[in-house]
Image: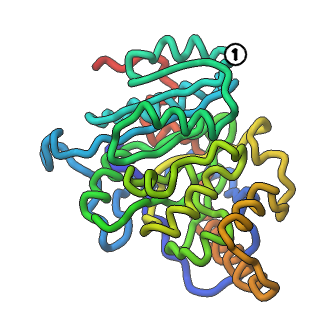
Amino acid sequence: MDRRQPFAEPARPRRGGRLRNSKRGHGTSPKHRSLVPASLGLARAGRCNRGPVRKGSAGVTDLPTISIVTPSYQHGSFLEWTLRSVILQRYPKLEYVVMDGGSTDKTPEILRRYQRFLSHCESAPDQGQADAAARGFTHTTGEIMAYLNSDDMLAPGALNFVAGYFAAHRRVDALYSHRVFVTEDNTVDSYWILPRHSNWLMSRWDYIPQETCFWRRRIYEEAGGIDPGFQFALDYDLFVRFMQRGQMRRVNGFLGAFRRHAASKTAGLIEGEVHPEVARVRREHGIRLREWHRLPELALYEWIDVRSRYFAARKKTGYNYDRLWGGLLTDHRLPEW
């Protein structure tokens, strides 16, 4: 498996099938749990993808600057994995900002160790995740932007892929990928395999995986940036504004990993429950859900669930996500560059 390549091209399932909400885990038999799927090393992302930027394919000066902000608070148990998943991309034109809300766990110690790899870092009380992310972006200048929560991770090679994709698709303003779920100990336990992007679907139902989404600064500024008034649906609100003004794409692979744990914001939600902030986004952007919309909503759930279960069942769960990184995420030694 080539670990320089960023993500999997999911298996192509047979047509048909029914599904329900894919937030449930999709396990495999115990005999497969030590296997790392070779397909997670593939770098193709649909027919039009040109693949990741390779060494020697372009000079450093030709690469776009990528700005990533990590809002953080009391995630000392996961933060180092997040930092390493960004820093170990070894992307030559990276601006990495960490905005911590005044954590009292081991976060300050971790940030001191990695401070020389960060373009900006501060730890002070804030007004929440959206406020931290929005202020963090004021310290950046990159042409491509993203924010990565302090319990999530990027896939190996993700930044090179993103740079190459935007260079090859000048009209695309934002991109995202399928989603892989990991547990508190980095075990991959399920997936979201998403359909091709549709503004109509994705503006009505919040399925865009935030940890995999990258966008151009031009669309961020045109859309007005992150609204600090949100605490839960800040990404959904931002992406709806992107869809209203520009072009989004779903690439056929995995650019990052979403961690599920007891302290996460989504942990307390009941399956099928609509968060008040999601309803607020729909209301503020004039997105009306009519009675007949229940049919495409259920069809979307079914589509995602069948394909996610199909993909997971092919020996693609039960392994440690760090194995894709060759053990580098849990290696506490600092990079030597």
Camera-nearest residue between 294 and 23:
294
Kindly tell me whether residue 315 is visible in this rendering: no
Above or below residue 126? Residue 69 is: below
Disc 1 crowd rating (10 Å Cα; few below 14, some 14-19, many 20+) is few
| Rendering quarter of residue 140 | top left
Quadrant assignment for the C terminus: top left
The residue that appears at 48% across and 12% down in the rendered structure is: 113
Which residue is the site of mark 1?
Answer: 105
Colour approach in the figure? rainbow
| Rendering quarter of residue 117 | top left
Numbered-mark total: 1
The residue that appears at 53% across and 76% down in the rendered structure is: 198
Camera-nearest residue between 77 and 315:
77
Q: Residue 191 location, x and y as percent?
A: 61, 58
Above or below residue 117? Residue 250 is: below
* Relative side of 293 to 154, left or right: right
Above or below residue 108? Residue 190 is: below
* Relative side of 13 to 45, left or right: right
Q: Residue 297 location, x and y as percent?
A: 72, 78
Q: Residue 165 location, x and y as percent?
A: 31, 59
Above or below residue 330? Residue 40 is: below
Kindly tell me whether residue 140 is visible in this rendering: yes
The residue that appears at 45% across and 52% down in the rendered structure is: 220
| Rendering quarter of residue 325 | top left
* Relative side of 124 to 69, left or right: right
Q: Amino acid at mark 1?
A: Asp
Which structural element holds mark 1?
A: loop
Camera-nearest residue between 242 and 9:
242
